Image (spheres, rainbow, N blue to C red):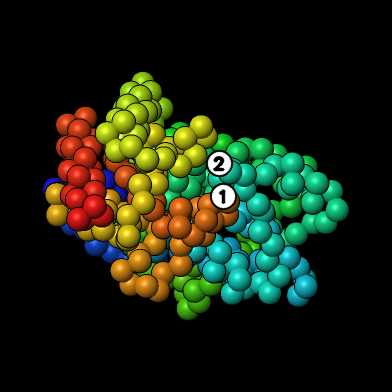
Amino acid sequence: MIYLDNNATAPLHPAARQAWLEAADQFVGNPSSPHRIGARAEAALARAREELAAHLGCDPFDLVWTSGATEASNSVFHHLSRIASPDAEVWISAVEHPCVLEAARYWFSKCRFIPVNANGQVKIDWLEAQLQKQRPALVAVMAANNETGVLQPWKQVHELCRRFGVLYFCDAVQWVGKLPGVGLGEIDFVSGSAHKFGGPKGVGFLKCNDGRFHPLLRGGLQEEGRRAGTENVPGILAMVAALRAREPFAAGSVLLDRLEWRAAVERELVRQIPGTEIVAEQAERLWNTICALMPQTECQGRWVVKLDRHGVAVSTGSACASGKEEPSHVLRAMGMTAEQAGRAIRFSSSWETTREEWEGALAAAARVQSSLAGITSG
Ligand code: PLP
């Protein structure tokens, strides 16, 4: 099977597996316990915190371990709802992941969407003009989009927020482990998730620089009172080990190779399957993500099912088979019609994906196209 759904979740990296097993054996104590066995686990967590802080460029104290990015997002909006005035607004980009969109809507009654252009990038001019008139409690703009791979101008957003004295939350889930983390640590709130870059599922982090953080989870003084619950020591050490394994790739020449591979696959996809369109083709995008609008068929869900039968796992934003899911809000925000959004499929590779696998995926796509063309004409 060729696995091209790494933006949904990536397989466990061998270094992460090794770190998890070693930690489960060596750090058996509860990091909060007063004895030496507990202290050893606490010391291992402190080392992991320092390593992640160095990767992001922040103070180790600013990092809170979480169960993943969904918890981190909810924690941010919950905290803000406790410190902001009752009529405060939060502004979130129209292409955020549901864990940001829905957390914002749940904790705040006034949410405004920051519009994106046809390439899916937030309109910086719009944001600047609005900030001149009004200051929200928070601006949330992700680093890289999970559906399209489009990179957001998060450094510019950060600069604007700093200039206008507004807090900034950046969901960096799809960025961390794929691109260098430098600079993220300067942002007020940043979330990350281990299972997107080869760490285990159910572990992540929140970077927050507010020492008076109001915890979402209560019932313990762990994480300096910012998140109750015994820390997942093996999971955290495995997450940091996965990131360590990714770092040389994300900063090196391999990155350029992967961008070239992506461009070559896109060219072939369009050549072999006429009518295919690459979403945000001209925008800066993650090296691993191709979102393509496939030629019209009666149900684009067929593409995913048929590619699966041909041994290729990909993903789609909406599923017409269920008849319930809405077309992708990300593609709709970029100005696509529901019909166009319904034709999107996403190929997302990992650092381990080979050229041969990409070629295999292309060949499978061409076979699916022939079979669908047969159905349409037959
Ligand atoms: N943010 C983005 C951009 C994502 O792609 C995902 C996962 O799909 C999440 C947040 C949620 O992460 P987690 O699975 O750690 O809750």
Q: Is residue 205 left or right of residue 130?
A: left
Residue assigned mark 1: 334
Q: Is residue 221 left or right of residue 24?
A: right
Looking at the image, can residue 207 be seen? no
Using the rendered view, name the quadrant where residue 262 is placed.
top left
Quadrant including the C terminus: bottom left
Using the rendered view, name the quadrant where residue 35 is placed.
bottom left
98 above or below 367? Answer: below
Q: In the rendered structure, find residue 119 and report the number of the disc placed on it.
A: 2
Q: Position of residue 356 (x, y in %)?
A: 17, 31
Callout 1: 10 Å neighbours few (<14), some, many (20+)? many
141 above or below 363? Answer: below
Q: In the rendered structure, find residue 130 and report the number of the disc placed on it.
A: none
Q: Which residue of the protein is positioned furthest toward the bottom in this rendering?
A: 219
Going from the N terminus, do you reach mark 1 or mark 2 first? 2
Q: Which residue of the protein is positioned furthest toward the right in this rendering?
A: 133
Callout 2: 10 Å neighbours few (<14), some, many (20+)? many
Q: Is mark 2 within 8 Å of ligand 1?
A: no
